[in-house]
Image (spheres, rainbow, N blue to C red):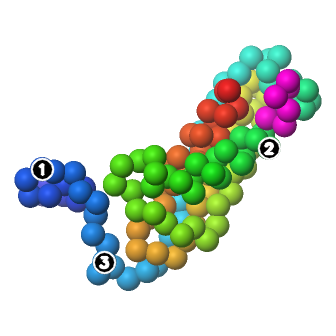
């Protein structure tokens, strides 16, 4: 059986998936990632001494904002009314890294995987910045 690519029409044009006939269901997606940093940077993050301030606090807000606006960033994503969005961090001291996890929930007709992936990506990029 060949895979179905529902973001393309019969002519191969990119289209937004039609979810009109779908029933809303509870949907949850969790994405995680990590960023490796130098020891001085990790110490500045954990000691809250970074020149830019509260690195993880700013990264949390950036991840949340990005997830909420995924439809503006990723072509063909549906604008979604998210009911829950959280970005959490863990310090991986031995790896000299920060782990980020983004959880997104809603009751709707389409999944929230792209929102979770966008949220965790932007949170990690903000840490790097």
Give x and y (percent) for residue 78: 40, 62
Give x and y (percent) for residue 70: 49, 52
Residue receiving disc 2: 57
Secondary structure under tag 2 reads helix
Of 81 and 42, the residue lying toward us = 81
- Horizontal side of 122 relative to 53 (left or right) equals left
Of 33 and 76, the residue lying toward us = 76
How far apart are the alpha carbons under marks 1 and 2? 43 Å
The disc label shown at residue 20, or none: 3
How many residues crowd around disc 2 within 10 Å: few (fewer than 14), some, or many (20 or more)? some
- Compared with residue 8, is residue 100 higher up or lower down, i.e. above or below? above
**Residue at screen point 67% across, 45% down:** 62
Q: Quadrant of residue 97?
A: top right
**Residue at screen point 53% across, 59% down:** 29
* Residue 89 on the magenta segment: no
* First reached walking from the N terminus: tag 1 or tag 2: 1
């Amino acid at each position: 059986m060949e895979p179905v690519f529902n973001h393309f029409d019969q002519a191969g044009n990119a289209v937004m998936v039609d979810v009109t006939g779908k029933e809303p269901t509870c949907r949850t997606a969790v994405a995680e990632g990590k960023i490796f940093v130098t020891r001085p940077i990790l110490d500045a993050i954990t000691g809250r001494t970074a020149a830019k301030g509260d690195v993880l606090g700013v990264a949390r807000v950036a991840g949340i904002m990005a997830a909420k606006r995924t439809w503006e960033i990723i072509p063909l994503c549906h604008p979604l009314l998210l009911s829950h969005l959280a970005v959490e961090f863990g310090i991986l001291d031995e790896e000299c890294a920060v782990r980020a996890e983004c959880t997104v929930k809603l009751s709707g007709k389409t999944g929230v995987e792209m929102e979770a992936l966008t949220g965790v990506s932007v949170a990690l990029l903000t840490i790097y910045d």
